[in-house]
Image (cartoon, rainbow, N blue to C red):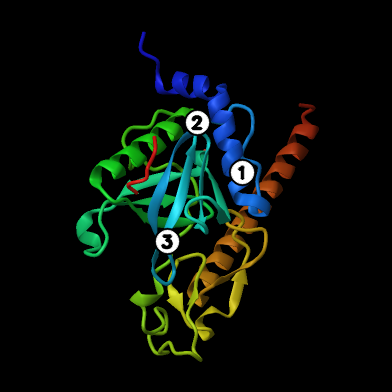
Amino acid sequence: MTLTFEERLTRLADTELNIERIKGIEKAFGSDNKKPLAIPGRALVGEGVLIKECRKKPKPRYFFLFNDVLVYATIVINKKKYINQHVIPLKDVQIKSINDSENPKLKNGWLIMSPKKTFCVYATTSKEKFEWMSHISNCIEKLSNNERKGFDQIKNIDIAPKWIPDKEADTCMRCEQVKFTMVNRRHHCRNCGYVICGDCSKNKFLIQSQSDEPLRVCNECYKILTSDRKIKSDNNFTSTDSSDESDAENDQFNPNSNDVNF
């Protein structure tokens, strides 16, 4: 009898080998293990090195794919110790393949999109890319209540913007006047991902899907965000108002690398 992907994961989660592997990963993070990884029902699906597009330049990061979360970290000692742990719940993740022509220096890439963070990763080979995307997609499908088809299906959730790498902007992407230097530092708008100067990013706004604290946003996004908040507030007030009137009326009438190992 052929087991489904979900059935294989369920059986794997209960094995002693799986439990020991996850405990080993927790140990490799040491005191930097911000969230417990060894929890009941969690299975390690695969792991390996991927190149992650970072703010300044692409860097190797070690990724762990579990049946419910994607974890990545900075490699410290020959894949035996990790720091800077990031945990992304798969229920909030979307993935999208990147065409090789979009970046001549890096191939076999795809986007990992979530409410807190969106970034590009690149595998060593097309086969490795396919394996990662297939397994991530299968894990997401298992967690989802809705049917998903293909890698690029979009869910109705807020997605954090992909930050434009520093090297792609010599001048502010908003005012297009300020040149970046050691004095005029680059900043990123957390709402659009643009590289901006200090004068074009004097405001902060609470983007609840990304943080519990107000984040730096560009002036243009700040206008849009505050305007949207006002509209929502006015709509809520109007809705409450009409509801109260309705109640009054009723009262009157009595009523979601090549080291890869899967």
Question: Based on the displayed image, in which of its 4 quarters is residue 60 positioned?
Answer: bottom left
Q: Check disc 1 and report the residue beneath it.
A: 26
Give the residue at x 40% y 75%: 166
- The N terminus lies in which quarter of the figure? top left
Give the residue at x 27% y 51%: 108
The disc labelled 3 sits on which kind of residue?
Lys
Label 2, label 1: how many angstroms apart (C-alpha)? 23 Å
The disc labelled 2 sits on which kind of residue?
Leu
| Placement of 103 over or under 46, stated as above or below | below
Q: Position of residue 98 (x, y in %)?
A: 28, 53
Q: Check disc 2 and report the residue beneath it.
A: 143
Viewer-side residue, 212 vs 158: 212
Viewer-side residue, 177 vs 257: 257
Q: Secondary structure at mark 3?
A: loop
Q: Secondary structure at mark 1?
A: helix
Q: Check disc 3 and report the residue beneath it.
A: 162
Q: Are marks 2 and 1 in contact (CB under 8 Å)?
A: no
Q: Position of residue 156 (x, y in %)?
A: 46, 43
| Placement of 99 over or under 259, stated as above or below | below
The disc labelled 1 sits on which kind of residue?
Glu
Residue 42, disc: none
Marks 3 and 2, the one that precedes in the sequence: 2
